[in-house]
Image (cartoon, rainbow, N blue to C red):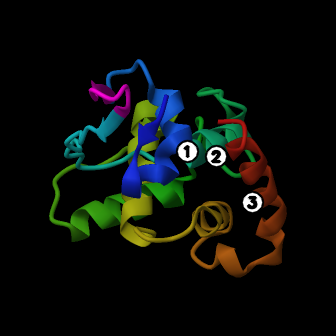
Amino acid sequence: MMFTLGKFSSLIPMFFLLWGTGYFAPDPKPEGEIRIEPVYIEPIQVEHIEPICITNALIQVESAGKDSAYNASEDAVGCLQIRPIMVREVNRILRKQGKERRFELEDRWDRQLSLEMFHIWREYHHPNSTDEVVSRNWNGGPKGYKKESTLKYWRKVKGHMTSY
């Protein structure tokens, strides 16, 4: 059996993975040759793609996944260990963007609201930053990526990212 892929020859390994999934349709030729035609799938329009790996990794490092985590010495609360200064910063960002939404300190206990605060902060301060810069600044503040003390934190986050 012969396959004619032409400029798609680099897709041979992918072809075998996708055979039978409907992504490729065999077109029998009279000579017994099978021609494979790739099928174009229209991309879905997404307003925001959630960076799941880094978010989950941060949650594991910060609270071992516990929404009820509390660090009294820093008043850090919830799955992302959000401090009052971060709530103020997120509210400042929302105010600057002309939005009416505001967060309260109690919102830190709620996983969904904590994630919303994190994403507001990340999209405002780090729309194009690497996961390392985001992680180190989450841990060490606005210039956290420059602090040697945040390297150990980044290694922990990176270690958890490989498990997702």
Q: Which residue is drawn at 51% across and 39% down?
A: 14
Of labels 3 and 1, earlier in sequence is: 1
Label 1 packing within 10 angstroms: few (<14), some (14-19), many (20+): some
Label 2 packing within 10 angstroms: few (<14), some (14-19), many (20+): many
- Residue 55 tag number: 1
Residue segment shown in magenta: 24-34
**Total marks drawn?**
3
**Residue 24: x, y in percent?**
33, 30
- 92 w.r.t. 68: above or below: below
- 66 w.r.t. 36: above or below: above
> Which kind of residue does numbered mark 2 sit on?
Leu
The reply to whether dot 3 and dot 1 touch (C-beta < 8 Å) is no
Tell me if 65 is positioned left or right of 31 in this view.
Answer: right
Tell me if 91 is positioned left or right of 99 in this view.
Answer: right
The residue tagged with tag 2: helix, strand or loop?
Answer: helix
Residue at mark 3: 154
Q: Residue at x 39, y 54 (%)?
A: 6
